[in-house]
Amino acid sequence: MTIQRMDNVLIAVDDIDGVVARLRAHGAELVGEIAQYENIYRLCYVRGPEGIVVGLAEQLG
């Protein structure tokens, strides 16, 4: 059996600023900054207290 490693997990959110604020209140930190890809998405990565990094994506428009 081959086990494949997953390098990225992105979670779709409706309000990236609100989600980041709530995660920070629980010990998470931004990895870099919130970036905007054209007028399509706002994206960021956050690291939780256990060191796990996940991406957040907010679709614009």
Image (cartoon, grey):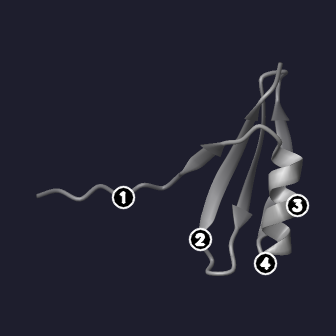
Indicate the amino acid at tag 3.
Answer: Ala
Q: Is residue 32 above or below residue 17?
A: below
The one nearer the camera, 60 or 8, is 60
Q: Position of residue 52 (x, y in %)?
A: 59, 71
The one nearer the camera, 61 or 41, is 61
CA gap, disc 1 and disc 3: 29 Å
Q: Position of residue 3 (x, y in %)?
A: 23, 59
Which is more foreground, mark 3 or mark 2?
Answer: 3
Residue at (62, 64) in percent of width and height: 53
Instruction: Tell me if mark 2 has few (under 14), some (14-19) or many (20+) residues whose alpha carbon lies within 10 angstroms of its own.
Output: few
Indicate the amino acid at tag 2.
Answer: Ile
Image quadrant assignment for residue 50: bottom right
Instruction: Tell me if mark 4 has few (under 14), some (14-19) or many (20+) residues whose alpha carbon lies within 10 angstroms of its own.
Output: few
Which is more foreground, mark 2 or mark 1?
Answer: 2
Which is more foreground, mark 4 or mark 2?
Answer: 4
The residue labelled by disc 1 is 5
Query: Mark on residue 56?
Result: none
Which is more foreground, mark 1 or mark 3?
Answer: 3
Q: Is residue 2 above or below residue 10?
A: below
The residue labelled by disc 4 is 27
CA gap, disc 1 and disc 4: 26 Å
Which is more foreground, mark 1 or mark 4?
Answer: 4
Position of the N terminus by quadrant = bottom left
The residue labelled by disc 2 is 52
Pointers 1 and 4 in contact (CB under 8 A)? no
Position of the C terminus by quadrant = top right
Query: Mark on residue 21?
Result: 3
The one nearer the camera, 19 or 49, is 19
Decide which of tag 2 and tag 1 comes sooner along the chain: 1
Decide which of tag 1 and tag 3 comes sooner along the chain: 1
Decide which of tag 1 and tag 4 comes sooner along the chain: 1
Decide which of tag 4 and tag 2 comes sooner along the chain: 4
